[in-house]
Amino acid sequence: MKGFSLLFPEKIIFGNGKLNELKNISIYGKNGLLITGKNFALKTGLIDRIINLLNDKNIFVFNNVEPEVSVETVDRAADIARKRKIDFIIGMGGGSALDCAKAVSGICKENYSVKDYLDNKIKIIKDPCFFIAIPTTAGTGSEVTKNAVLTYTEKDIKISLRSEKLIPSISILDPELTLTMPETVTAYTGMDALCHAVESFFSINANPFTKLVAKNSIKLIFKNLYKAYKNGKNLKARYNMLYASLLAGFSFANAGLGAVHGISHPVGAILKLPHGLINAMLLPYVLEFNKKIINKELKNLNKELQCDLIENIKKLNKKLKIPENFKKITKITEDKIDYIISKTEFKTGSMTFNPVKMDKNSVKQILQKVF
Ligand SMILES: [Fe+2]
């Protein structure tokens, strides 16, 4: 039996209306930087709500995070943090806003570009800025992980800034904040959470704890994702989805992911499609590919879930209007497949945790099916 270690944020606050706890948290310093997406937080009034909750602090707002956030945006936000002598950072929104805020918290105490860290010229050594993560989607898991996924524009890749120091100091998960998520965002982020749970369950680095929470996450997503998609105001389904996403986050933060994420990052950087959509389409194909190694464990999981995992994922995709392959979305040439493979990272990150060892040929086999 292998041993294991587990990483968690210092504190997780979960529950309906729990955003209000923000005013009770003891935060050192006066100057805060709120990092969020372009439209969502403004439209929903959440920016004003946070400023009101922290009315004894000076909150500067950076609401310029784009989907699949770029290194340039991280550098712009980090510059603001340095110039304004920011004491703490709040990231609020989906995966991109949270990952941007997380990266800024890790790099803003030094004067380097985030690219210097991603190029391995330097490491995050200093303790990051106090960082509070507030997800408004149910899928990213970023609120409990040690990495921030960024688009490295000039290299045409998505890459993770990784350090145990990047784990948020505090995460506030309030299901009420997810009630306004549009249908497609509910579907894509929910399927991303399912990928986190399934991939970490079969990861070669999984341990008894990660398997337990991943399994529970899969069960909750199967029961609640379609309900939340069909009726966004269903608070019980939203609560269960945010909880499932948190469990999946715990699991993959400690066990790693697999080939779905390993392939989805270059596909996302090149085709500019949403992360959760790409993952949802890839998941059944990667599981079929992995079957030769995971078959026994898959059969046991199927028994416990009382369904066939792969077939159920396909059914769920259909109900969420996620196409079976990319043909319905975009045209992919053979050259493009080769380009995607050339940008795939095999030696580090998600791919290294896949139960079947992946190489260029295996990725090609999967891509030819899903494209
Ligand atoms: Fe993901």
Image: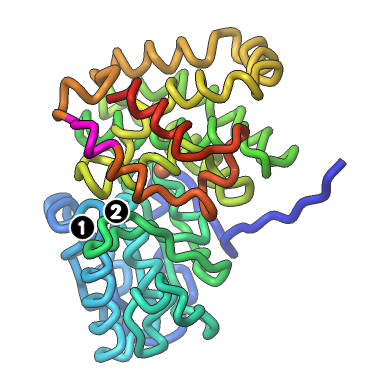
Image x and y of residue 85, in percent: 32, 91
Q: Quadrant of the N terminus?
A: top right
Secondary structure that dominates the magenta span: helix
Kind of residue indicated by mark 2:
Gly
Element at badge 1?
strand
* Magenta run includes residue 305: no
Q: Quadrant of the C terminus?
A: top left
Residue 79 falls left or right of residue 38: right
Structural distance between the alpha carbons of marks 1 and 2: 6 Å
Query: In the rendered structure, are the residues bearing label 1 and label 2 in contact, judged by CB atoms less than 8 Å apart?
Result: yes
**Ligand 1's quadrant:** top left
Foreground pick, 255 / 338: 338
The residue that appears at 40% across and 27% down in the rendered structure is 366
Magenta residues? 332-337
Residue at coordinates 35% horizontally, 50% vertically from top-left? 343
Mark 2 Cα within 10 Å, few/some/many (few <14, many 20+)? Answer: many
Report the residue marked by disc 2: 93
Residue under numbered circle 1: 37
Snapshot quadrant of residue 119:
bottom left
